Amino acid sequence: ETGVTQTPRHLVMGMTNKKSLKCEQHLGHNAMYWYKQSAKKPLELMFVYSLEERVENNSVPSRFSPECPNSSHLFLHLHTLQPEDSALYLCASSHGGQGYSGANVLTFGAGSRLTVL
Amino acid sequence: GQNIDQPTEMTATEGAIVQINCTYQTSGFNGLFWYQQHAGEAPTFLSYNVLDGLEEKGRFSSFLSRSKGYSYLLLKELQMKDSASYLCAVMDSNYQLIWGAGTKLIIKP
């Protein structure tokens, strides 16, 4: 256990479904992140929240919608996804947000494996 | 553009030593991270280098040369549990993390 918990661990959905991924951290961190991890590709940063305010959106398609109701919880709402969105979605938290300092260590959850049929 | 290069896959023998290289071209530099990720698990932090030289932590060491845009992770006395992917990431001048695609390390008995 890293202190960052993601649910569900596995999700299969059709292109017309709506589902949500949930992330919870118990580390007292101030920033939370969503990353996409595809096989043999670098981690892709999707969203960053610092003190519950979204500070970065790396041109992610609108079919992905983040929500951060408080500093401990982060959601990723999914709708009308495409098969190419199948990937591992990782949540992470850190003491400071991006731009905080160099030694800003990320603590990751184990990820939600998403398959879009 | 910004780029991190590391080998896709490496194989080593239990008890041996392996060196995983990472080269980078980024807009500025504010530190280099190594993370370990076992299959189906969360990436976990291994090391952070911001100054040139070698940092040792038990069986793992990480080296940085900023002038060469180069780092390596050295794993000694390899154990089967070291089979994992190793991710290299550089923090650029805007404190954005640039990630490599990871190196899958396979340990054979």
Image (cartoon, rainbow, N blue to C red):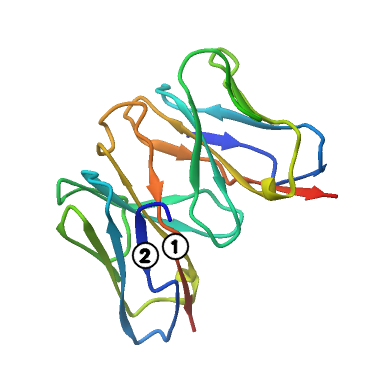
State the image quarter where residue A30 is shown: top left
- The residue tagged with tag 1: helix, strand or loop? loop
Q: Are marks 2 and 1 in contact (CB under 8 Å)?
A: yes
Q: Residue at x 44, y 62 (%)?
A: A111
Q: Nearer the viewer, residue A34 or B80?
A: B80
In the image, is residue A86 above or below residue A23?
A: below
Other residues around mark 1 within 10 Å, as few (<14) / some (14–19) / many (≥20) = many
- Disc number for residue A36: none
Query: For this view, does B75 lie left or right of residue A104?
Result: right
- Disc number for residue A6: 2
- Disc number for residue A111: 1
State the image quarter where residue B52 is shown: top right
In the image, is residue A1 above or below residue A7?
A: above
Label 2 chain ID: A
Q: Residue at x 28, y 47 (%)?
A: A27
Residue A94 is situated, as x and y percent measured from the top left of the image, at 30, 42
Query: For this view, does A99 lie left or right of residue B46?
Result: left
In the image, is residue A62 above or below residue A17?
A: above
Q: Residue at x 64, y 38 (%)?
A: B6
Other residues around mark 2 within 10 Å, as few (<14) / some (14–19) / many (≥20) = many
Q: Residue at x 75, y 39 (%)?
A: B78
Residue type at mark 2?
Gln
Residue type at mark 1?
Gly
Residue A50 is situated, as x and y percent measured from the top left of the image, at 19, 45
Residue A20 is situated, as x and y percent measured from the top left of the image, at 30, 74
Query: For this view, does B95 lie left or right of residue B76?
Result: left
- The residue tagged with tag 2: helix, strand or loop? strand
Report the number of numbered marks. Answer: 2
State the image quarter where residue A78 is shown: bottom left
Residue A82 is situated, as x and y percent measured from the top left of the image, at 43, 76
